[in-house]
Image (tube, grey):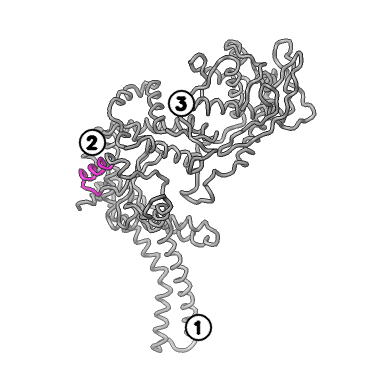
């Protein structure tokens, strides 16, 4: 069938036959709903012709008619929900043809070579994947009209992708455009574009629409007063789950077979780049972007950053050697008219999907360039965590200043009368406020006046205070456990105070954010190690001339003389887990860091 693609595969059940099996489930559900009405019609007809005279048939007929009316009413309401409920749509950045004429031309050329309908539109997603998405549902058209009418100077008309019978939308992972070359992107997109052929078959389109309607009905059933809709929708989904899955496998197999004649050899090489892009994208989000998001900032050029991350990965990993030689070829982002603006839009969407940030930039949610990242994110992150660490020490009534012992170390102070939790002020000792950014906002703790320095002691937020408290000659780590518990509790309170991200509202399903949270649960010891590391880095910056830096694969790093110091982590763990400060003290001494000197907090 020209223009729709082959849907029969050797050794694979026909996608069309599986689609018909899904539609038979729908027909049986309709038959069950009409059965009481049919029985009522038979009884009424029999009563009218006199075939069922006398008792108890009048009562039976009345009861059956009432049941039939109730079933028809409930079934009609359920059918209306399935037909009108809006299926989930992946949040994407729409890409008009004017913004990427070369990319549209490439996709249409692919469709012509494979004799399939071209996608109706193209959109970008901040993920390492590509797929086709149907957006022809009436609810999507209503949403498109509402969004268009809300824009300035718009006509209020939906796009071609939401027109009845339109081809699916091609959703492309934005990291592919920046990392892949044009030829590699064409090879990777070929089997995806080939899927528009089977999608145009009416039986497959009908079956997909039925399954999406049931899935949307389950979501509607979570609303108050509509809970009765979810159970029958789940039942129907269970009945057609196997056939729907096999139908999609058949469609994928058909699309893959049709695309074999288009850049097949290059596709094998390009698949290696897909795996590499996924690894680099994951490291960039979890190690680099996530710390900035927690500070209320969002990197404005994540897609450009993934190129730097993957280039660094290629340099470090011998398995990735030779990949950087591709960088001399034309990148796929050249297919865009304004790649910088598209990168910024996808970066903002990534922050919303993976962290739950606001949908738009604002005073508490502003972009940050890569050049300003070390100063505005790394340094601020360290000083915020150092402030939180000292606030926890204040809560545990640890004295701000104690004279060093004979060996130059501080002995842990015995608990005294509990003092009000307060974050120490800057080295000047004046009162101020310490901003503690949470995941989507800021929490401010009032700082109390620091006590004046004594002749044989020190004052202010010092690293020596932390070293002395965590030193445990017995190795039991009781002090560390108490401090870790305080920090964990403070972080939990900040997250509760921040509440849901701005703009999230009470969304359900695919509209709820974050869809893919990147914050795995961290133990108290891990949090304590992070905060002690931040305090050490602050001391190194303030007293030893070190600088904050950015590593594309590992995130915030400490630079000494322009070189990264990667030997700090094991020494911090030795202090936190074993209570032994000597390895860390030796490291500080070699670097020229003065633990007794107060550090500047946020």
Viewer-side label of 2, 3: 3
Residue 156, image x, y percentages: 38, 55
Residue 322, image x, y percentages: 31, 22
Based on the picture, tell me whether residue 310 belongs to the magenta stretch: no
**Quarter of the image that includes the C terminus:** top right
Going from the N terminus, do you reach mark 1 or mark 2 first?
1
Q: Is residue 393 in view from this perspective?
A: yes
**Residue under numbered circle 3:** 371
Query: How far apart are labels 2 and 3 at the CA level?
Result: 39 Å
Residue 420, image x, y percentages: 75, 32
Mark 1 neighbour class, 10 Å CA radius: few under 14, some 14 to 19, many 20 or more = few
Going from the N terminus, do you reach mark 2 or mark 3 first?
2
User: Mark 3 falls on what kind of element?
Assistant: helix
Residue at 62% x, 31% y is: 524
Label annotation for residue 263: 2
Q: Which residues are magenta?
A: 104-117
User: Mark 1 falls on what kind of element?
Assistant: helix
**Residue under numbered circle 1:** 59
């Amino acid at each position: 069938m020209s223009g729709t693609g082959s849907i029969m595969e050797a050794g694979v059940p026909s996608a069309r036959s599986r689609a018909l099996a899904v539609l038979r489930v729908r027909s049986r559900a309709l038959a069950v709903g009409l059965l009481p009405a049919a029985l009522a019609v038979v009884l009424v007809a029999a009563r009218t012709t006199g075939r069922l005279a006398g008792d108890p048939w009048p009562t039976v007929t009345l009861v059956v008619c009432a049941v039939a009316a109730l079933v028809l009413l409930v079934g009609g309401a359920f059918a209306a929900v399935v037909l009108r409920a809006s299926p989930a749509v992946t949040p994407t950045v729409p890409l008009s043809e004017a913004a990427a004429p070369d990319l549209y031309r490439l996709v249409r050329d692919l469709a012509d070579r494979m004799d399939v309908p071209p996608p109706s539109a193209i959109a970008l997603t901040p993920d390492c994947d590509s797929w086709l998405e149907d957006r022809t549902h009436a609810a999507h058209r209503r949403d498109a009209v509402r969004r268009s009418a809300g824009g300035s100077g718009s006509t209020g008309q939906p796009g071609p992708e939401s027109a009845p019978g339109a081809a699916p939308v091609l959703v492309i992972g934005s990291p592919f455009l920046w990392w892949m070359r044009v030829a590699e992107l064409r090879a990777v997109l070929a089997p995806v574009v080939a899927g528009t052929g089977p999608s145009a078959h009416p039986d497959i389109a009908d079956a997909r629409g039925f399954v999406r309607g049931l899935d949307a009905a389950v979501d509607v059933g979570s609303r108050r007063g509509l809970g009765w809709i979810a159970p029958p929708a789940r039942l129907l989904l269970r009945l057609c789950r196997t056939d729907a899955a096999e139908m999609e496998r058949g469609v994928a197999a058909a699309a893959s077979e049709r695309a074999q004649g288009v850049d097949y050899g290059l596709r094998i090489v390009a698949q290696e780049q897909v795996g590499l892009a996924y690894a680099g994208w994951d490291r960039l989000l979890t190690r680099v972007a996530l710390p900035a998001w927690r500070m209320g900032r969002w990197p404005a050029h994540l897609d450009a950053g993934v190129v730097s991350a993957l280039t660094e990965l290629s340099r470090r990993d011998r398995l990735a050697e030779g990949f950087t030689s591709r960088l001399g070829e034309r990148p796929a982002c050249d297919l865009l008219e304004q790649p910088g603006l598209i990168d910024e839009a996808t970066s903002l969407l990534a922050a919303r999907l993976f962290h739950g940030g606001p949908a738009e930039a604002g005073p508490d949610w502003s972009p940050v360039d890569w050049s300003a990242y070390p100063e505005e994110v790394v340094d601020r992150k360290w000083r915020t965590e150092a402030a939180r660490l000292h606030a926890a020490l204040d809560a545990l009534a640890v004295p701000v200043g104690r004279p060093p012992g004979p060996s130059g170390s501080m002995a842990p102070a015995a608990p005294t009368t509990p003092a009000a939790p307060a974050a120490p002020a800057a080295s000047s000792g004046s009162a101020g406020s310490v901003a503690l950014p949470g995941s989507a906002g800021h929490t401010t703790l009032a700082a109390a006046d620091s006590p004046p320095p004594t002749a044989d002691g020190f004052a202010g937020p010092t690293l020596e205070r932390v070293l002395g408290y965590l030193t445990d000659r017995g190795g039991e780590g009781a002090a560390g456990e108490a401090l870790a518990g305080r920090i964990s509790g403070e972080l939990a309170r900040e997250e509760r105070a921040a509440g849901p991200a701005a703009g999230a509202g009470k969304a359900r399903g695919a509209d709820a954010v974050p869809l893919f949270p990147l914050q795995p649960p961290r133990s108290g010891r891990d949090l304590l190690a992070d905060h002690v590391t931040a305090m050490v880095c602050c001391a190194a910056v303030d007293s030893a001339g070190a600088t904050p830096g950015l590593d594309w694969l590992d995130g915030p790093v400490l630079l000494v003389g322009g070189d990264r110091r990667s030997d700090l982590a094991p020494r911090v763990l030795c202090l936190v887990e074993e209570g032994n400060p000597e390895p860390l003290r030796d490291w500080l001494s070699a670097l020229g860091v003065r633990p007794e000197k107060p550090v500047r907090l946020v």
